[in-house]
Image (cartoon, rainbow, N blue to C red):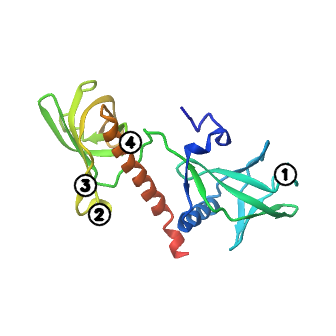
Amino acid sequence: MISAETTRPWRISPEKFTSADHPATIERTLHSISNDRLFMTMVSGLYRSGETVLTGRDAKNLLIGKPLDWEETISSAKVYFRDSCKVWNFFRTSVICTTHDTIYTSLPEKIHRLQRRRYFRVAPPVGCKASFRQQDIQFSSTIVSDISGGGMLISTDAESHCPDDQVKLRDITIRVPTGENGSGSSRQLPLIKEGMIVRSFTDGFTKRIYFGISFREELEVVDAISKYVIHREQQLLRERAKPLRNS
């Protein structure tokens, strides 16, 4: 099992990364690297640079801060960085020339992004709600705070009847708004036949009660929900990049 927290990204097989070559995706990525001042590591053969940053770019080149230990014989490199979701990415580039403080490289043709683990969680749109049965009691319209292929975090107010920990849940339905700010119609994710509350806590400020739910489901359903999670993550990344269109 790969953990990006413990494994250096350049030690991870390229097969574990997904590739994107759409110009808009590359442009959004470079914009984020520049505006968010994301740290980068340049890798070539046995060489690993210290952290550096993108200092500029034009229609043909990237300008990267030259590491103190840069080896002038390097002609190409992989550039690794963590995006705003803390996921490792890399792109390949050719070194065009260097100055005393800058490396000029070619523009990337693809962005390679480490595939997320199955249980990576994202925040759904405002207004996402879940319903389920526990024994003979139906719980409806609980608010979904985050969701993954393996579970979700829901909340209810303190005045509501609360489900019990470590007791099976059945027929879990999740409705996701399709309009902005929770308005308009909604879509239902695949029915989850069984789950269980594995933890609960109370928010001391809002007094809402939160429940962590683990899904016990067939692989096809888990994969379908995971696809939604990936779609939602991409949607959130696009929303963060919206200022780019106005610049």
Q: Which mark is residue 187?
A: 3
How far is mark 1 from mark 4, CA to CA?
Answer: 41 Å
Residue with the mark numbered 2: 179
Q: Are marks 3 and 1 in contact (CB under 8 Å)?
A: no
| Front position in the image: 22 or 116 | 22
In this view, the mark in front (2 or 1): 1
In this view, the mark in front (2 or 4): 4
Q: Earlier in the sequence, mark 3 or mark 1?
A: 1
Residue with the mark numbered 1: 70
Residue 153 visible from this viewpoint:
no
Above or below, 227 relative to 107:
above
Residue with the mark numbered 4: 148
Work out which residue is located at the far left of the displayed protein and give it: 136
Q: Quadrant of residue 130?
A: top left
Q: In the rendered picture of this protein, how many numbered marks are placed on residues?
A: 4
Seen in the image, is 63 located left or right of residue 166? right
| Front position in the image: 89 or 38 | 89
Q: Are marks 2 and 1 in contact (CB under 8 Å)?
A: no
For image coordinates 58% across by 39% down, the residue present is: 4
Residue 239 visible from this viewpoint:
yes
What's the residue type where badge 1 is placed?
Trp
